[in-house]
Image (cartoon, rainbow, N blue to C red):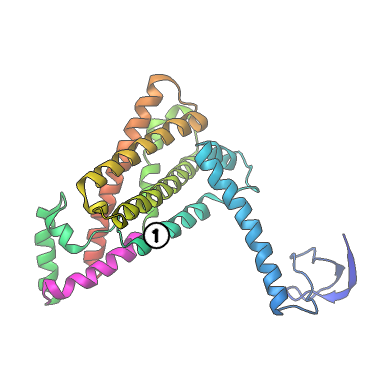
Amino acid sequence: MAKRANWICPSCATRRTAAFCPACGEEPLRPRDLKVDDLATRLLGALSSVDGRLMRSFRLLLVRPGALTEAYVAGRRRLYVAPLQLFLIANALFFALQSLTGIEIFSSPLASHLNHQDWSAAARPLVAARLAARHETLAAYAPAFDRAAILNAKALIILMALAFSALLPVFFHRARRAFGAHVIFALHLYTFILLLMCAALLAAWGEALAGGGGLASPIVDKALSLVNIAAVALYLYAASGAFYGARGAGRIAKALALAAAVGAVALGYRFAIFLITLQTS
């Protein structure tokens, strides 16, 4: 390790001679510290490090489903972004694209809850009671609800991954994985789903820009839904073999059942967002 003149560590106030403090990892202040060129150099270094791990993580996630989960559980972690961090990055990308395209997937406006959802009959008396408690009209309340629903859907989307992870020990009990391993698998699955939703958003947006109806078109909506379900089923088929050792016809059945469970969890999530937003807005 390169030597330096004596310097006082800014963090632990101990005199050091090494290039880095062996106690806390701090480095000495440099003559150009906090200058624009120094900050730019540090930023580029940080981004290249993160981007390298990020691209490697996304590539492994997409090309070899289940391999990234296996690597993390086995302790091979330095080359990849941690599961929760990877999920949050995909989540940020997804909601950025939602803002860009103006298309909302996991959150619905109040009018949709009242008129177009499977739970609309139950939603109407709940909303009526909320309006009575607030002494407010539906027209005045709806915009506040819609804004809060978007924020809640963004902040609480991890609940879908946690809910799904509870199913995995039931389907793969013979694998004898710790519950934390199931959570990692679910986080990687939902990272994949968020990236899939990003592609669906761009496809729907592009179709709308070309003069179509986008997701408002039943044909486009159904086509993208079928493609997404098929992609999730294929991911689960590949990942369950790589991580859980699933084989044979049972592997196909579990992949299909879990893909259906993803859809059910998404539907339950949208209803949960309705209830949470109704009580907090």
Residue at numbered disc 1: 97
User: On the image, which quarter does residue 39 sit in?
Assistant: bottom right
Q: Residue 56, how many percent across, how many down?
A: 59, 46
Magenta span: helix, strand or loop, mainly?
Answer: helix
Residue drawn at 46 percent across, 40 percent down: 182
* Figure check: 258 above or below 155: above
* Figure check: 34 above or below 225: below
Q: Which range is magenta? A: 136-155
Residue drawn at 36 percent across, 61 percent down: 154
Quarter of the picture containing the N terminus is bottom right
Q: Is residue 82 left or right of residue 231?
A: right
- Say which element carries label 1: helix
Q: Residue 25, how many percent across, how many down?
A: 75, 64
Q: Amino acid at mark 1?
A: Leu
The question of residue 146 being in magenta is answered with: yes
Residue drawn at 22 percent across, 53 percent down: 216
The question of residue 87 being in magenta is answered with: no
Q: Is residue 176 visible?
A: no
Q: Residue 140, how many percent across, how many down?
A: 15, 76
